[in-house]
Image (tube, rainbow, N blue to C red):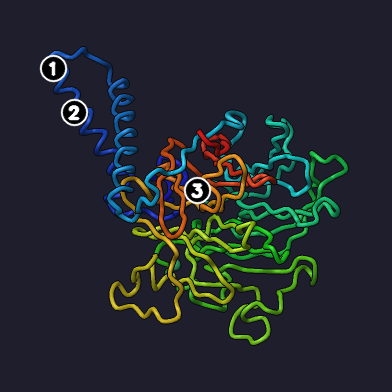
Amino acid sequence: MKDARRAEPAFTGEGRSDASPRTTMVLKTLLCRLFKKVRMQGGEEARSEADLAVRCNDERRSQRRRWAFFNSLLGAGLVVGAADPPSIRLELVVGRGLSNPVYVTHARDGSGRLFVLEQQGRIRIVAAGRLVGAPYLDITDRVLAGGERGLLGLAFHPKFRENGRYFVNYTRSPDGATVVSEFRVSADPNISERAERVILTIGQPYANHNGGMIEFGPDSYLYIGMGDGGSAGDPGNRAQDRNDLLGKMLRIDVDRGTPYASPSDNPFAVSGGGRHEIYAWGLRNPWRFSFDRATGQLYVADVGQNAWEEINIVQRGGNYGWRIMEGAHCFRPRTGCQTDGLELPVAEYAQELGRCSIIGGYVYRGRQVPALLGSYLYGDFCSGEIFGLRDKVQTLLLATDLAISSFGEDEAGEVYVVGHRGSIHKIVGR
Ligand SMILES: [Ca+2]
Ligand SMILES: [Ca+2]
């Protein structure tokens, strides 16, 4: 699998060109080691090969941070807006005991608990700042995990407190299809029933671009982000095909129908001309999306092919461009593409300086960092940077060493960052 070329699973999917960030990093590290060896022969104390590697990696990391900052100043896809950007830091919530976490959320039940998805197929609970030992749910036997596959999404019903219903999105073993299923809590609030009711199954032609996010909108309908199916460049042109559920934002009503109904104001629900579940289309891999809890606006971060990462405010019936466009640029054809009727992203940034894959987050509506109010927070999986978008201006807020797999909110609207190597962090002020 192409993903194996990476040091860790990425949520982008395809191989990059030969000048991929990974290749560039390896080259830089080799050059650094060579350079240091020459310096040592000139009198510096001799060190082991392993030590050289560590020192060069450290150097590379801090170089990347500096470049990220300069890049934000120079405006290569990113522009610094605020002269004095909000000062944030990460407070560690869970630092051990988690395996490949990919999401964190809350149950809308007033319990204050956080629910963490482990990619292999477990839901874990964090209560009063401590990771609960026994999983809330373990369906590792039903989940095909690795790369961009696994247990990818979790959404509690708006009336979970009364009905105990919640929903997950996972990659099914053994065939790799996407499944959206309903589960219920058991008599023990910290343990789920294992019986499931399958709501929707969507076949996947390739291992990557499975989307994964599910969330209830302010309209109480379930939104499902579907990737274009995978490979690279959307070979089947599925994102533009309104009769295919891949490459779409879907919206369904899980309180009516068997097993669901489509809201009558979905674009094709009444008029036809496409699948009735479709809400918006032309998406490549909407790995993470969220609703602004103040305005209800739907922010979708669409992962780019090999040049541009983008943020969209998605509206019903909109065509967000893929594979005709990548970000605000022609993709196929490379020049002179027909852009009539396509919705452009509200922001984009280039895949350079170690950036490879946007990880969508949340419009901040919490209380911990007043300076962030109204900013859309998001990050990059490869660079570990955390950005803020406000009034169309993107600002680098923090450079981290995390492989950021997701953001998440607690019930109060505080925002968390998920490190794929096994950590959960809360965004707080300095
Ligand atoms: Ca796929
Ligand atoms: Ca787009």
Sort mark 1 into few (<14), some (14-19) or many (20+) by Cα contacts within 10 Å: few
Mark 3, ligand 1, within 8 Å: the answer is no
Residue 41: numbered disc: 1
Instruction: Give the distance between the C-alpha atoms of the residues marked 2 and 3, in whole angstroms.
Output: 33 Å
x 61%, y 32%: residue: 93
Sort mark 3 into few (<14), some (14-19) or many (20+) by Cα contacts within 10 Å: many
The image shows residue 297, relative to residue 360, as above or below, that is below
Occupied quadrant, residue 25: top left
Q: Nearer the viewer, mark 1 or mark 3?
A: 1
| Residue where numbered disc 2 is placed | 34
x 49%, y 64%: residue: 312
Residue 147: numbered disc: 3
Count the marks: 3
The image shows residue 218, relative to residue 33, as above or below, that is below
Q: Amino acid at mark 3?
A: Gly
Q: Is residue 355 left or right of residue 241?
A: left
Image x and y of residue 130, in percent:
69, 29
Sort mark 2 into few (<14), some (14-19) or many (20+) by Cα contacts within 10 Å: few
Q: Secondary structure at mark 3?
A: loop
Pick the residue in front: 414 or 201. Answer: 414
Q: Nearer the viewer, mark 2 or mark 3?
A: 2
Pointers 1 and 2 in contact (CB under 8 A)?
no
Pointers 1 and 3 in contact (CB under 8 A)?
no
Q: Is residue 173 visible?
A: no
